[in-house]
Amino acid sequence: MSRISWWRRLAIGAVLGVTALSVPDGAVAPTTSALVAVDRAEGIDLSPDVIWILALGSDARLGQNVTRSRADAIQLVGINTRTGAATAIGVARDSWVPIPGHGSNRVNAALFYGGPQLMAKTIEGLIGIEPDYVMVSSFWGLRHMVDAIGGVTVDSRFAFSDPYLAPQGYRVGKNKVEGYGALHFARIRKSLPRGDFDRSANQQEVIAAIQRKVAANADRPGFLDVGTLAVLKNMDAQVSPKVLFQLARAVAAVDARRITGCVLTGSFANIGGASVVLPDRALAKRWGDDARKDAVIKRC
Amino acid sequence: MPKPRDRAPAAVLLALVAGLALGACTGDDEPTKSASTPSAPAPSSAPIDVAPGKLTGRIGRAARDAAVADVAQVVDGWFEAAYLGEYPRSDFSDAWPGFTRRLAGQARRESAVTSNAVRGAELTSVRATVRKVRVDLLSAKGRAVGATARFRLVLETPGTETITGRLSLSPVRGGWQVFEYQVVRR
């Protein structure tokens, strides 16, 4: 993960700080002899209130630099530590966009040209939100991370398969998958109705599935730490382990009922012999304006 | 940043961690903190029971002991400030030592759970019959980079109340700071 404007945010954070609020949840718990009132309180303090993470899936092969390859999965994820809301904006890898200092090209080339920093600037130019962190994972990195937390359950909108990657396929509804299954769920596109757009939506489902698994097991001693260590080992982790530890708590605190996700679509075009997507830039800006301060997109 | 209110409890906690959980330590594993005369816990309250919990990543035993003791000191400081002490009591303004400033503000708004503020003026005494803390550590490059303190505090007020949950802490200069809490009171 790369920290953007670390010193600036650190300074702002030191001055302002943040507090995550949650409403105490009153309930009644039975015991062997009485009904006992149970009061709960929860809070988290991370800076800023809304954390934006650019999650990238690199197409780097073993031995290649994951931060200087092309980004095949592009998800801008926002987490509101105050409310527990979270959202993801997916961008198709073939989206034709301006890349600062490099003219226009497919958005996934920004990682190759300038690493996580340039990728962040490119996405900021498209959506209008500056990521606080960039998280870059390889194929095997995602696989190892999902395996480290014991697999996840993805909810598929389609029944689909791939003769090479997943011949057994996925059924509509819940699918329990280990690392390979999650990876292929996020990679396959040719057998999906809208191709790369639906693949991007599936990537969001994998992220949501990981969050559900993390949140459900957050009270297990060491579970979050094992996941954090897996991120440290399997991702580009230029950010400090201390910050990763804190981010893991933020992820666990997300309210699954308040997760939204949108995939940026557009029109198809041919530029210089290359098939590309001309993204709906106005829509991207609208989503960015909508979600910037609260990590909620009211309508895709 | 939390300011240790008293170094003596740290020495007590360090000794407890080293003695109870890890067995007798000698040589390099000896606590490195100053061992000033420890103050005994309140006579009517149970002593704190501290031990390492789940350890993730590699860390030396001495560093682990020190981290567990320092984290437990923060947790016990909150126990004392938020729930114990002398009663009747109406001032709970400093009930969350070791919490970040913003988190202390949040805890104050939930003070019915995170302290005895709501009933403090009505109570005549409060004693802890159980003060248990287990400290999970995440370490990287031989250093503790995060801690989760799972706790159980049983109070006689004179009725019995149980406070359980977890605190998440990050290392800061001079100690550890709480940036997340989950507290259940029953």
Image (spheres, rainbow, N blue to C red):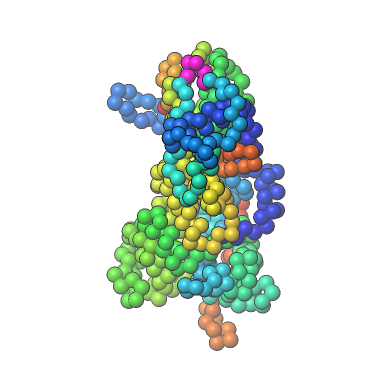
Judging depth in this view, the residue of B72 and B24 nearest the camera is B24
Foreground pick, A156 / B101: B101
Q: Quadrant of residue A95?
A: bottom right
Viewer-closest of B31 and A149: B31
Q: Residue at x 48, y 67 (%)?
A: A138
Label total for image: 0
* Residue sitting at the far bottom: A273
Task: Examine the rendering and report whether any part of residue B150 can be seen.
Answer: no
**Residues rendered magenta in the picture:** B41-45
Instruction: Name, please, the residue furthest toward the front.
Output: B27
* Residue at the top extreme, as displayed: B124
Q: Is residue A34 left or right of residue B159?
A: left
Magenta portion: prevailing SS class: loop
Above-or-below relation of A269 to A67: below
A269 relative to A281, above or below: below
Q: Position of residue B31 (x, y in %)?
A: 55, 35
Question: With B131 as the anchor, is A294 left or right in this view?
Answer: right
Residue A175 seen in this snapshot: yes
Q: Quadrant of residue B49?
A: top left
Reply above or below: B35 against A56: above
The structure residue drawn at horizontal position 43% and vertical position 55%, both measured from the top left corner, is A210
Quarter assignment of residue B24 = top left
Q: Residue at x 56, y 33 (%)?
A: B74
Residue B63, image x, y percentages: 53, 42
At a point 54% along the width and 46% down the height, the residue shown is: B144
Specify whether residue A13 is painted magenta: no
Q: Nearer the viewer, residue B52 or A187?
A: B52
x, y percent for residue A177: 34, 61
Q: Quadrant of the N terminus of chain A?
A: bottom right
- Indicate the position of residue A188 as horizontal and vertical percent values: 40, 71
